[in-house]
Amino acid sequence: MLSIALIAAALGLSNFAASIALGLAGVDNRLRRDIAVIFGLFEAAMPLIGLMLGRRVADTLGAGSSRVGGGLLIVTGVYAFVQARRPDGVLRAPRRRGALILTGAALSLDNLVVGVALGATKVPVVLAATLIAVVSVALSLVGLEVGARLGHSIERRSGELGALVLVLVGAAIAAGFM
């Protein structure tokens, strides 16, 4: 359960970072609602799909599935860290639903990979997907408000922090600590 909570927080931090960038451009109540709904749907659906795929992988790999799952989390975390450090990684605020859907899909691709990793470790599917979605939506809404108030410096650091948590949890799972 602790690993699911840490992963949900790490994944939610990417939405937090993106929402800060969106908040910088200013959001009204309609856009705030659209962001919460669209990000929430993708954040729940992608790990659910990944979890189901991961279960199949786990059955095939047997005892080695924890190492594979942990390795996938490490790779995802390293990739997320590199992306957070890119100077051109600043997200511009989309104003149309189509652009928000593409943003939500792009932000949730890591959730798909993480879902596969978690599925390989046999965590409860519905609990994991629900927790990831709830945390992501909450952090998205908080990020919108933070973005409107604080600016770019927090956006960059939250992406790096989320990536670091993914690497650490992945290493703990691969080593058999979680």
Image (cartoon, rainbow, N blue to C red):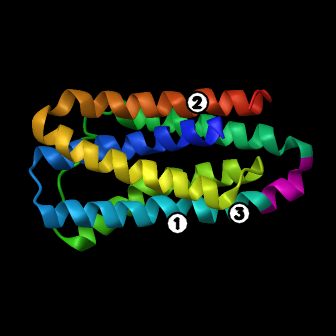
Residue of label 3? 53
Q: Comparing marks 1 and 2, which lies closer to the viewer?
A: 1
163 is higher (above) or lower (below) than 54: above
Mark 1–mark 2 distance (CA, rounded to whole Å): 22 Å
Q: Is residue 175 magenta?
A: no
- Percent of width and height locating residue 162: 45, 34
Give, as a single range, the part of the protein colored magenta.
56-62
Residue of label 1? 45
Q: Amino acid at mark 2?
A: Val
Name which of mark 1 and mark 2 comes first in the sequence: 1
Task: Look at the numbered disc 2 and give the secondary structure of its residue.
Answer: helix
Residue 145 falls left or right of residue 162:
left
Q: Going 60% across and 48% down the picture, which residue do you hit?
A: 114
- State the residue in front, 160 or 83: 160
- State the residue in front, 152 or 44: 44
Q: Comparing marks 1 and 3, which lies closer to the viewer?
A: 1
For residue 125, which quarter of the picture? bottom right
Label 2 crowd (10 A; few <14 / some 14-19 / many >=20)? many
Q: Is residue 58 magenta?
A: yes
Residue of label 2? 167
